[in-house]
Structure formats: structure tokens, C-alpha cells
Image: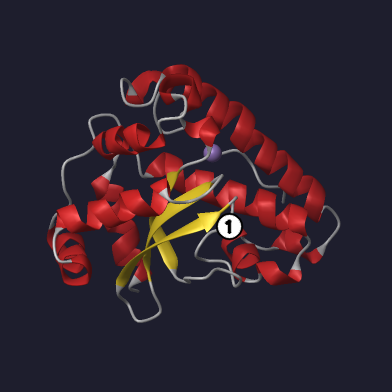
Amino acid sequence: MAFELPKLPYAFEALEPHIDARTMEIHHGKHHQAYVTNLNNAIANTDAEKLSIEDICKNISKYPMPVRNNGGGHYNHSLFWTIMKQGGGGAPSGALADAINAAFGTFDEFKTKFNAAGATRFGSGWAWLLVGADGKLAVSSTPNQDNPLMDIAEVKGTPIMGCDVWEHAYYLHYQNRRPDYMTAWWNVVNWDEVARRFAAAGK
Ligand code: MN
């Protein structure tokens, strides 16, 4: 079974003015599609064709670099689209809010740490909120299309929220101003989906 580009769960313009429609259209239809196509080509006629993208990521050190780059690209973007929505933002509640306060002190301190993880990632990569093996939340960043599921990640765990800090995610609207993009990005975070992923990671 070949991997497929998931449908975007909202219209291209849904995240405006924070993320513009043209960026979303290219990001989903061109960049993510390319990761899917290249991943399928990289695993054609190998055992990896039978695996889930999660299982491929968890054993990524066994695969050649095209699988790492494009498999990561497919997993990361599939997560990214779902943890954003029109009219998102605000703050989490319930068990997720409690876990954020326990791990980082306050929601604002968490945001500061997450923004710093994205802003200081040199070149292309991602900022993550993840559930570690100890069940606690942590913030990390990864280069390129790596992610915390991968056995080669510096900080391993189950990602529940990620911000794409590749220039292709923001350059049309924000040019070189990555911190401005990240500040605006908090206004589209889908906390219901992050909370759902947090609950699922604990099971
Ligand atoms: Mn991207």
C-alpha cells in the first residue's frame, strides 16, 4: 500500500491572516506531496511498504537517507495540518494544561521555550512538544524532517504538537522573520487535537 497525501482538513485560506492561502496551497499540494511521492519511490519493493509511517520512523536508523527525509516529511506534515485550525489559539485546558504547568511552570514559560526551540534551530527543522518515555512533556527541536519518534532523535518521545520552521512554511508572507511567524502561529493551534494526541500518547 503506497502512502497517500492526506486531505487538508480545512480550506487553504482557513488560517489567514496568520498563514496565507498561497503558502498553504504550495506547502500541502507541492511540498507534502513531494515527500509522499519520494517516500513511495524510496520504499518501493522493500519490506517497509507493509509498515505504518510511525513504525518506519521508530526504526529510521535502518533505512537510507531518502526514507528518513521523506518519511519524516510525510509524518511531520500529516501531524502539522491536524494541530492547526481556523479560529484556533487560546490556551489548553484540562489534563494537557496541568501537564504543561507541571513540566514548564506556566503556559507562558512553555511558549517561551517552544518559541526558542524554533527560533534557534539553524537552517530547516521543527519545534516539538512531546511526551517522553517517563510520561512527562518536553520541548525539543529537530533538524530537517527528523522527529522525536525517530530512534536517532536527541530527545525521543511521542510528538503531540509540532511547528514547521522551514522557510517554505512562512517565507511568502514573513520572509526572513521566523519569530513573527511563530508568534502568529499560536493563533491557529488546535488545542483539542493536541489534547487528543496527549491522551492517546499516555495509553
Ligand atoms: Mn513543511
Looking at the image, which residue is at 62% across and 61% down?
Answer: 52
| Image coords of residue 202 (percent x, y) | 33, 73
Q: Which residue is mark 1?
A: 146
Q: Which residue is depicted at the point 48% across and 72% down?
A: 156
Q: Could you tell me which residue is drawn at 49 percent across and 20 percent down?
A: 172
Specify whether residue 154 is in view: yes
Q: Quadrant of ligand 1?
A: top right
Which x, y percent locates residue 200?
35, 65
Badge count: 1
View extreme (right): residue: 45
Q: Quadrant of the C terminus?
A: bottom left
Q: Please name the residue shown 19% across and 57% down the image.
A: 109
The colouring scheme, among rainbow, by chain, secondary structure or one colour, is: secondary structure
In the rendered view, tell whether residue 145 sits above or below residue 157: above
Q: Residue furthest bottom?
A: 134
Residue 34 vertical position relative to residue 17 in the rendered view, above or below: below
Confirm whether residue 162 shows in the render: no
Q: Position of residue 158 (x, y in %)?
A: 43, 66
Q: Is residue 154 left or right of residue 69?
A: left
- Choose between 58 and 176: the one closer to the eye: 176
* Observer-nearest of 122 and 203: 122
Q: Quadrant of residue 98?
A: bottom left
Whether the residue carrying mark 1 lies under 8 Å from ligand 1 is answered with: no
**Which of 168 and 112 lies nearest the eye of the viewer?**
112
Three-letter amino acid code at the position of disc 1: Asp
Q: Residue 70: image x %, image y %?
A: 68, 49
